[in-house]
Amino acid sequence: MITVIADDITGAAEIAGVAWSHGVNAVLSTDSIQPSKDTDVLVIATDTRSCSETDAIIETQRLATQLLNGNYGIVFKKTDSVLRGHIIAELDTLANILNFEQVLLLPQNPSKGRKIEKGNYYINDEPLSHTAFRNDPEFPATSSSIQEILCNCVNILELSENLVPNKKRIYVAEASTNEDISIQLGKAKGNVLLAGGADLFKALLQKEFPDCQVRTTNDKIIPQEYSIIVCGSTQSEDITLRPFAKVSKTYNAVIPENVFKGESAESWLTSLHNQYLHHKSIAITIGQKENGGSQCAVRLRNIMAEAVQELVTTHSPALLIIEGGATAYSIIKKLHWDTLVLKAEYSPGIVGMTHCDTEIILKPGSYPWGSIL
């Protein structure tokens, strides 16, 4: 079995989707780490990326202690693909409690044009700090240097090098292709904690479960009578321009400017109730506003979680589509939907799961919708 600890729920869903597509039995939980006997991959979704570093360490300590006292097979730490979050603190905590001598970290996903070369991170050949991630409200990418991003706490592992004992036990491996990923994975012999993104996890599955029957991904999200879409980023594209929204005549409920700036959302939440019953498909969006900072981001996702809770109470949707990890975690926890069953992978990173009669589709904010919506 492989046990995955993810620092946000869309990252957890992405990993669970990779496992589902590979043909293994995967369970995603935001609460329990008690897998059934037929579980091949247990994915535990936390929200530590949105916590303070101190709280992230405390949560990681709690999970690691439970893993230490049980039989959870291979441990894999899912990190953000562009190194947002409390990466070093969480990896150090896991390695200390679970007695790992070294950590091999490959956050990059070459399948999405994300690579690390000569100690620098690139997305589609653009330096990370030149991309939209420089405007991230909580972890802005002010540098493309891996050492600078991770506060000089790591070694860079080139393709021609091997893991060796070092005071800085965390190695970030260079890789520009999926073949590079497999080569670097092959160097993790002995007591090494694996950490990183979906491409590394896929390579690990191919190594540990080589004979599974690969499942086919779905290529379209089909409109249903009652649908709720939540876009938790100021960087989101206009969801109402997508074919799904046009076919379902989705109403775009943009957070009003006064609510964005801190006024009460009570009257706006009341209006959502009426629009949802009338249109039956509603999109809750922030709109094209300036980045309000981390405190604003936390307040907005709490408002969105409250809005979704009220709408679900009004009429349970057939589809709940959420963009953005922290937003998704807030909503799922608010709804108390702690266990989600994998249903489909629509494209890498975009996964469908079920709770009762509702399909929940989660998408990382930085991934494109492509043609599925």
Image: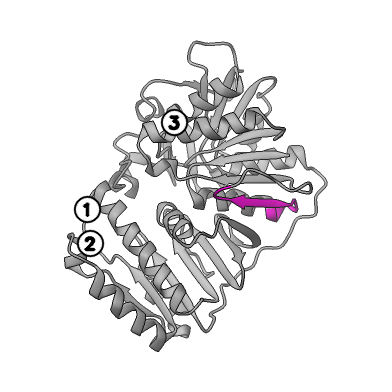
Q: Position of residue 153 (x, y in %)?
A: 42, 20
Label 1 belongs to which residue? 292
Q: Do the residues labelled 1 and 3 touch (CB within 8 Å)?
A: no
The residue indicated by pointer 3 is: 57
Binning the other alpha carbons within 10 Å of mark 3 as few (below 14), some (14 to 19) or many (20 upward) gives: many
Asked whether 256 or 348 is in front, the reply is 256
Packing grade of label 2 (10 A; few <14, some 14-19, many >=20) is few
Q: Which colour scheme is used?
A: one colour
What residue appears at the point 66 percent right and 29 percent down from the top-left corner? Answer: 69
Residue 338 percent coordinates (x, y): 56, 55
Comparing labels 1 and 3, the label whose residue is closer to the camera: 3
Answer above or below: position of 278 versus 238.
below
> Bounds of the magenta span?
20-31
Residue at horizontal 49 percent and vertical 11 percent from the top = 167
Crowding near the residue tagged with mark 1, few <14, some 14–19, many ≥20 C-alpha atoms within 10 Å: few
Mark yes or no: residue 50 visible.
Answer: yes
Mark 2 → mark 1, Cα distance in angstroms: 8 Å
On the image, numbered disc 2 is attached to which residue? 289
Question: Where on the picture, by quarter, is residue 218?
Answer: bottom right
Up the image or down, 275 lies above or below 88; here it is: below
Question: Which kind of residue does numbered mark 2 sit on?
Answer: Lys
- Element assignment for label 3: helix
x and y percentages locating residue 50 in the rendered image: 38, 44
